[in-house]
Image (tube, rainbow, N blue to C red):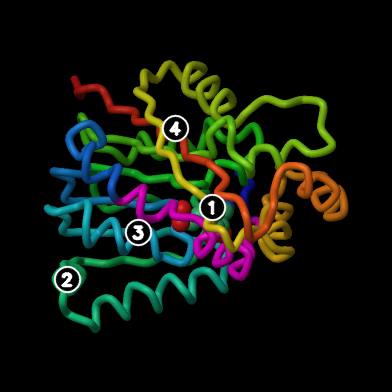
Amino acid sequence: MAGEAECSYEGFYQFRCRTNEQETLVRFFQEHGNETGFQSAQSFISIGAGDGHLDSELIRNSLPELASYTGIECGHQMYGHLCATLQRRHDERRDSLSTLDVRLVNSTVGEYPGPDGPVDVVFMMHLLYYFGDERCSVIQKAMDWLKPRGRLVIGVVNKGNILQKLANVGKTNLVSWVEKIATNLQTLGLGYTEYEVVHEFRPAGCDRRFAEFVLRRAPVIDAEADEIFNFLPTQYEPGTTHIKHGTHVFVIQKEKCR
Ligand SMILES: C[S@@+](CC[C@H](N)C(=O)[O-])C[C@H]1O[C@@H](n2cnc3c(N)ncnc32)[C@H](O)[C@@H]1O
């Protein structure tokens, strides 16, 4: 199981600041609490939790019954930010984090032995880009951690996403992440429902750190940085345009156990 490539914290920070993805995802999981299992989830594992900002907002706003949260993050710098984010929220003592059982793990999903018991939701937001053919084994592993009727929730960039376009620069094979994940789920025989969450880039736009962050999504990207910058001016007007982009969310419900 690969996927050990550490994500650039700085680039990810730029991405978060330059889009309204976090707000729209929080709202999406509030509005679709039943279908995604968020409304009633008591236990939740986030694989590739990043700096913890999205997860802590979800805990506060979209997971009303949550009692236990586990965040798995392989990057050392990211893991430091994850700990700081959740600790800061805990210290504020004005939200549900103050009573939550929080476990943070600095390891790859491949090295993580699994939770003590089955959980309600396993969450993989923008994680699967880091894996090649072994994506199926990551998905299967996550399914094994779920309770009967638990949900695996997978988020990837949608087809029109600027990140998808950047990822495809210099490539002839333009299979989108949505298609790749759908194929993986079908190969595994897993049924799913799909949703689109639409975001916007803020007018501040894109910069070099952001593009480098996209480039470092090993093993997906093989374009050179200069190719990205040759591509950007025709698609993107920093400071002027709200570019629509979005996240495609797959929800897979585990079958009831025999
Ligand atoms: C793009 S970030 C997304 C963070 C967060 N889920 C979000 O959406 O805000 C993906 C994270 O997955 C982590 N990651 C990559 N491969 C991993 C692996 N094999 N095990 C655990 N984390 C991994 C990266 O270090 C990175 O922080």
Circle 4 sits on which residue?
140
- Percent from the top left, x then y, of residue 119? 24, 45
Please state the extent of the stretch shown in magenta in the rendering: 5-26
Decide if residue 55 is on the left or right side of residue 93.
right
Label 3 residue SS: helix
Query: In the rendered structure, which disc, 2 or 1, sits on the residue that comes first in sequence?
Result: 2
Query: In the rendered structure, which disc, 3 or 2, sits on the residue that comes first in sequence?
Result: 3
Label 4 residue SS: helix
- Percent from the top left, x then y, of residue 219? 72, 45
Q: Amino acid at mark 1?
A: Phe
Q: Quadrant of the C terminus?
A: top left
Disc 3 + disc 4, Cβ < 8 Å: no
Label 3, label 1: how far apart the Cα atoms are: 20 Å
Circle 1 sits on which residue?
201
Identify the residue shown where x is 82% and y is 53%: 229
Task: Judge whether 125 appears above or below 148 on screen.
Answer: below
Q: Amino acid at mark 2?
A: Asp
In the image, the residue with mark 3 has its CB under 8 Å from the nearest atom of ligand 1: yes
Circle 3 sits on which residue?
55
Say which of marks 4 and 2 sits in front.
2
Q: Amino acid at mark 4?
A: Gln
Label 4, label 2: how far apart the Cα atoms are: 33 Å
Majority secondary structure of the magenta segment?
helix
Label 1 residue SS: loop
How many other residues sit within 10 Å of disc 4, few (<14), some (14-19) or many (≥20)?
Answer: some
| Furthest-bottom residue in this view | 91
